[in-house]
Image: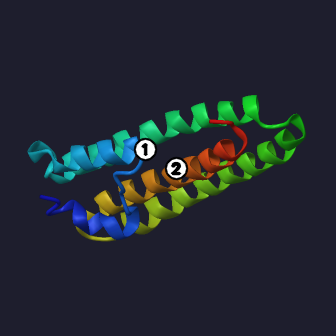
Amino acid sequence: MHSVWLLALPFYFASSEHPIDAALVRCLDTPENQSTHGQIGCFAAAGEQWDKHLNMVWGDLLDNLPSQTHPPLRSAQREWLKFRDAEFKAISATYGTMDGTMYRISAAAAMARIVGDRVKQLENLRDAYVEP
């Protein structure tokens, strides 16, 4: 249980609080995903889900927040996208120079976490404005 992917946790900090994190933990706990390939696949799937969810939350923000907040939000999101792309390049370059397959897992985990963290930031903004 969690034998190999625990090495990636310092870079990921998966939590079962968000449904995407819970699905990731289930994926990682599946016996067939105990290989490097399987674990990278789990993190890649989580990253794809975070990206889809990011787009949904972004749409919710624009639909529910006052229009005067849109220009600064769009500006911040454009800057975040630049940060994300630069961070992905840095992660790939750094982990790509390290020996050992565990670093490929760590890189995939770090990339998924970057997008997941942004989604949670945007969800907090959205939830502050959207009435329950």
- Quadrant location of the C terminus in the rendered image: top right
Side of 85 relative to 80 (left or right): left
Q: Position of residue 94 (x, y in %)?
A: 44, 68
Q: Are marks 2 and 1 in contact (CB under 8 Å)?
A: yes
Q: Position of residue 4 (x, y in %)?
A: 17, 62
Mark 2, secondary structure of its residue: helix
Residue 25 visible from this viewpoint: yes
Q: Against 101, is 56 above or below?
A: above
Circle 1 — which element? helix
Instruction: Say which quarter of the image contains residue 110.
Output: bottom left
Residue at 37%, 48% in the rendered image = 21
Judge by depth and name the residue closer to the eye, 17 or 80. Answer: 17
The amino acid type of the residue labelled 1 equals Gly
Q: Which residue is drawn at the image coordinates 73% and 53% (left, top)?
A: 79
Q: Which residue is mark 1?
A: 47
Q: Nearer the viewer, residue 37 or 67?
A: 67
Of callouts 2 and 1, which one flags the residue occurring earlier in the amino acid sequence?
1
Dot 2 corresponds to which residue? Answer: 115
